[in-house]
Image (spheres, helix red, strand yellow):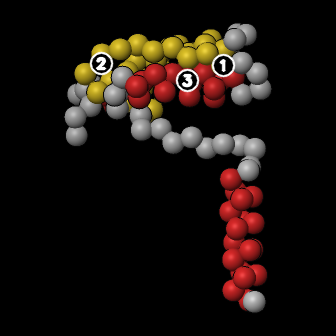
Amino acid sequence: MLRFLIALLCCCTLSACVSSDETQLYHRINEAYDFEVTHCDSFAMVTGIGRGEFALRDAKNNAKKHGEELNGTHIVWSQIDHGDPTKVVAVIYKCLL
């Protein structure tokens, strides 16, 4: 009986973590400053657009997604426009380790 209650409590705790309002995204691309990628190859520019309460975060996530699709390793923000919609522009780099 005690094992059942502990298992039930664990399941409830885990489901509460999954259903939180703020979602955490994991990105394989690293944000960097231009001086950190001097030894890397720049090969693309990407843009992102966001609207609403979390417009900047959404715009950056949108641009990061494009950079990951291009197999970039680093992203450097070059322009942020806080208008409606919020727009970002970034340079994608590929850095060899």
Q: Residues within 10 Å of mark 2 (few under 14, many from 20)?
A: some
Q: Residues within 10 Å of mark 3 (few under 14, many from 20)?
A: some
For marks 3 and 2 on the same chain, the one whose residue lies earlier in the sequence = 2
Whether residue 68 is visible to the viewer of this picture, yes or no, is yes
Disc sitting over residue 42 in the figure: 2
User: What kind of residue is marked 3?
Assistant: Asn
The Cα atoms of the two marked residues, 3 and 2, are separated by: 19 Å
x and y, in percent, of residue 38 in the image: 27, 25
Q: Residue at the location (74% across, 89% down)?
A: 2
Q: Residues within 10 Å of mark 1 (few under 14, many from 20)?
A: many
> Which residue in the structure is indicated by mark 3?
62
Q: Of residues 19 and 38, which is closer to you in this image?
A: 19
Q: How many marks?
A: 3
Do the CB atoms of the residues marked 3 and 2 lie less than 8 Å apart?
Answer: no
The Cα atoms of the two marked residues, 2 and 1, are separated by: 24 Å
User: From the viewer's perspective, is residue 94 above or below residue 2?
Assistant: above
x and y, in percent, of residue 75 in the image: 42, 26
User: What kind of residue is marked 1?
Assistant: Gly
For marks 2 and 1 on the same chain, the one whose residue lies earlier in the sequence = 2
Q: Residue at the location (61% across, 15% down)?
A: 49
Q: Of residues 30 and 62, which is closer to you in this image?
A: 62
User: From the viewer's perspective, is residue 58 above or below residue 23?
Assistant: above
User: From the viewer's perspective, is residue 40 above or below residue 80?
Assistant: below
The label nearer to you, 2 versus 1, is 1
- Compared across the picture, whether 36 is left or right of 52 comes to left
Disc sitting over residue 50 in the figure: 1
Q: Residue at the location (57% across, 40% down)?
A: 25
- Could you tell me which secondary element the residue under label 2 belongs to? strand
Do the CB atoms of the residues marked 3 and 1 lie less than 8 Å apart?
Answer: yes
